[in-house]
Image (spheres, grey):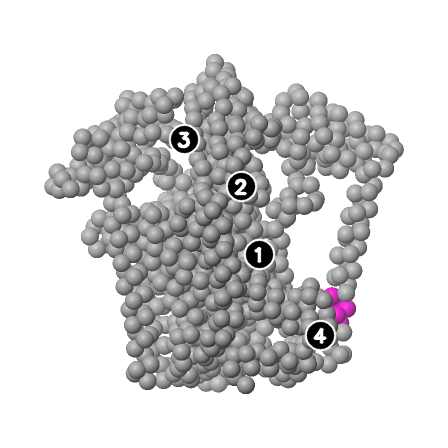
Amino acid sequence: MRARRTPFVLGGLALAGLVGYLLVTGMRDAMLYYLTPAELMARVERDAGFYGMGVKVGGRVAPGSVRYDPVTLRLAFDLVDIERGQPRIPVRYEGPLPDTFGDGRDVVVEGRLDRDGVFRARTVLTKCGSRYEAYTAEGR
Amino acid sequence: MLTRLGEVALAVALPVALWGVGAAVLGARRGHAGLVRAAERSVHAVFVLLLLASAALVTAFLRDEFAYAYVANYANRELPLPYKIAGLWAGQTGSLLFWALLLAGFATLVVHQNRHRHRDLMPAVSAVLLGVLAFFLGLLVGPSNPFALVPFPPADGRGLNPQLQNVWMAIHPPTLYLGFTAFTVPAAFAVAALVTGQLDTRWILVTRRWTLLAWFFLTCGILFGMMWAYVELGWGGYWFWDPVENASLLPWLTGTAFLHSVMIQEKRGMLKVWNVSLILATFLLSVLATFLTRSGLIESVHSFAQNRTIGTIFLGALTVATLAGAGLILWRRDRLATEHRLVSWLSREAAFLLNNLVFVTAMLAVLWGTLLPLLSEGVTGQKINVGPAFFDRLTQPLAWAMLALLGIGPVIAWRRASARNLRRHLVGPAALALALGAALAWVGVRHRGAWTTAVLGGFAAAVTLAEIARAARARARQGGRSLPAAVAELFLQQRRRYGGYAVHLGLVVAFWGFAGSAYTVERQASLRPGDALTVRSPFGPIYRLEYVDLSWYPAPNMTKLAATIRVLRDGRPAGVLRPEKRAYRQREEVSTEVAIQRRPLEDLYVILASIDDPNGVLRGTNPAPRIVLKALVEPLVNWIWLGGFLVALGTLWALWPERPTRRRPGPMRSRPRRAGARAAAAGVAAGVVLFGLARRALGQPPAPVPPAVAEQEARAAMGRLKSPYCPGLMLTACPTPQADALRDSLRALAAQGYRADALVEWTVRRHGAAVRAWPRPRGWELVAWLAPPALGLAGVAVLLGWWRRRRLAPADAAPPAALDPVDRARLEAALRDEGWA
């Protein structure tokens, strides 16, 4: 009976190895840190290798910083930490202006911070999660 | 007072459920039939109480009782009636109540079905079902009470999230929840089998249909969710590896694995531990999915609440349940010993085993990616996400393996396949698939992933079709029937097998659709009125989209801004599209309403991405603003829906109760059922005839009718027409003067005796097919409209059918049906073929 099991074990191990390999390489390419602007700046200060890494940053659009060209669809604004109000990270994005985007809005940007200190976003999402539930489920 | 009653009902249901668990356990231990019956009666009682509580909550919605926090959060006065009813499952606490209600309904059905059968298993089954119910009731009475009050009731509620205000809201969540809850039944039987030690195949045979039914609802739920995402989320995709989508996929993956692996246990007595574990995992993943959907622990488009208490309780309960399940299996491991060993890797057992490995691996990969933000935050304090690229990369090779196995599995011989068996079934299809691959490469398909998917799918489809054709030919030759008749006979007589083949074919069609997405073309441009955007379809045609103008309309609860886009396909006019932006007053939110032109090979998907200066539009200072228009051509996307429906229909086919004569011997007892079937058939036939007559009547010359009748007909017609002057609004609601004029002309025509149908046709001739709010009752349009609700109804019909067959004799008492000579000849040929005789 032992001998019959070996192919199973081998087959299982091979499959596990393959999936493990895919898991690890897939993670490396698709991994996204979820950070606040303050955390992101602290991170790149400590480790310059963090520039260019895929990140998701949740922050607030600094009032008065929005520039948008409706013809070229180029959007530029500064992102600030929601709690501390700084640091300011300049963000560049190309595409239609997201719905309800504007000064003081909370947004989540996905992209990477380049070495020139500019955040190039692939997506800009306006957040409205908090307004889905005005009263908490406990009825407070 | 009904609402108060609902609260009381919930509070009573919890102790009743707990008493039921105790009674079942005690009754089983002492062999006291009365106690067991008492437990079963408390199942019924809990169901009735939950029904009461749900009715109370719906009533609160209908009466706008905003003193209830839940009602205030998910409705407002202007919300249309259907969405108020759907409020029951719009948020966290309501969903939990709805879950419990559905489970209680299923539990009642199970108890009823097995009043005279499987008495040894039933106490444990009741105890498990009631235990799960008690858990949900505990949440509902405690931390997640749907009847919690707001101290200062607001004048109006907050309304429903605009993205949920869609027909699918009425269909998708209930279907998904039906699937989740139905998996509890086979899991309860598995636990019962473990507890009682009755670990033969009985629990599997008893719950086979339940598993299929759960799988059917889950599949439909996932499919409907994809269709919803496609029309509502406004970016042209249907699946984006959102945590909640993933959550619904997890039990689907293990459930699919289970559907296959039980066949090995039935046929060969192998994989007993595996099967018990799989069904328990499926149940636990269903609960996980429910809680991920509504707990807000993981960020997602679906999770609205941030109630972490619930999340913690759920996680704790899941952990305890997992440990308990593992403990039970360990305790019974001696009775779970396999009866046979795998003889060869070239056998159906091995193919099924690999299929299971693939499905479970896929489940683990998706689970890992989904829970990663939670896990990484717990371990390192740092939230880490993985994007769609991760899931795509991991699941793609697994999907290929699945497609290949889908081809091999159904035709490879049990135990040990001979070279002849493999040659005979696989060489032809493999050659066909390679020819398909060459053809695809020749026409320019260069995308490796899409090519591989298409070729493997082609292989699987060819094997399946060849197998059906082979069986049909044998039957036609030996029975002297025509080939189509033989195919029909096969499908009628071996529902499970041929329903399964239909499911396989549907999956292949859907995968071809997925492969098509590799060739999606996306263009966007900033346009002024008069400008145009051009998109070239991968199939050749060139679409030119001209921005004509932008108009805005007030509608209940929102303001709509709609761009008029004239479509030219290869230079020929191909209709007008009206993509919209909707600004909701209640929630200061904006939603995007896409416009889609569907064709068999491709969809033209148009998004009004943004409007420059929308306030200027509303004030009238900037009537023709610049817009950003996005257009996608999505090849083969309709194949996904088509394949999905084929999967659902195949499952229904396998699920549909067999003909009563085969199950219940004795002409006396089968007669009433036959009569019932005849009556149903006659009813359908009469309906068709009446329908035809009604349509014929349209053409007849009218005669003047009394004003009341005329008004009725005119109103009926308006109820089926969208206004040509207010995009998206029904004619009855459109406030413009042109609409008034149109309504007057319809009334005048109605007074002359024209019926509603004729009025609708008259308007369509004048204003184009876009004004038709309901589909014309013919062709593809009708199918697309009716398929989802029809599938849902069919599932419910199956349930009702089970309820009706309550006086059925025990299934195992039926004598095996004798093989007819044709089948015997086939069997012998097959046995010879596989080297058995």
Question: x%, y% of residue B604?
Answer: 52, 36
Q: Are marks 2 and 4 on the same chain?
A: yes
Q: Are marks 3 and 1 on the same chain?
A: no
Marks 3 and 1, Cα distance to the nearest angstrom?
Answer: 37 Å
Describe residue A75's horizontal placement relative to residue B677 as left or right: left
- Secondary structure at badge 4 equals helix
Task: Please say if B445 is above or below B289.
Answer: above
Q: Residue at x 49, y 67 (%)?
A: B426
Disc 1 + disc 2, Cβ < 8 Å: no
Chain where mark 4 sits: B
How many angstroms separate mark 1 from mark 2 (CA)? 19 Å
How crowded is the residue under tag 3: few (<14 C-alpha within 10 Å), some, or many (20+)? some
Outermost residue to the top: B621
On residue B646, the disc is 1
Does the magenta stretch mainly form a helix, a strand or a loop? helix
Residue where numbered disc 2 is placed: B602
Q: Judge from the rendering whether residue B659 lies leftward or rightward of residue B225; answer left or right.
A: right
How far apart in space, not on screen, are marks 4 and 3 (Cα)?
Answer: 66 Å
Q: CA distance from mark 1 to mark 4?
A: 29 Å
The stretch in magenta equals: B672-677
Q: Position of residue A72 (x, y in %)?
A: 36, 23
Residue A99 disc label: 3
Q: Nearer the viewer, mark 2 or mark 3?
A: 2
Residue assigned mark 4: B479
Q: Residue at x 37, y 30 (%)?
A: A95
Label 4: how many Cα within 10 Å (few below 14, some 14–19, many 20+): few
x then y, percent, for residue A71: 39, 21
B739 up-or-down from B682: above or below: above
In this rendering, the label closer to the viewer, 2 or 4: 4
Give the mark toward the camera: 3 or 1: 1
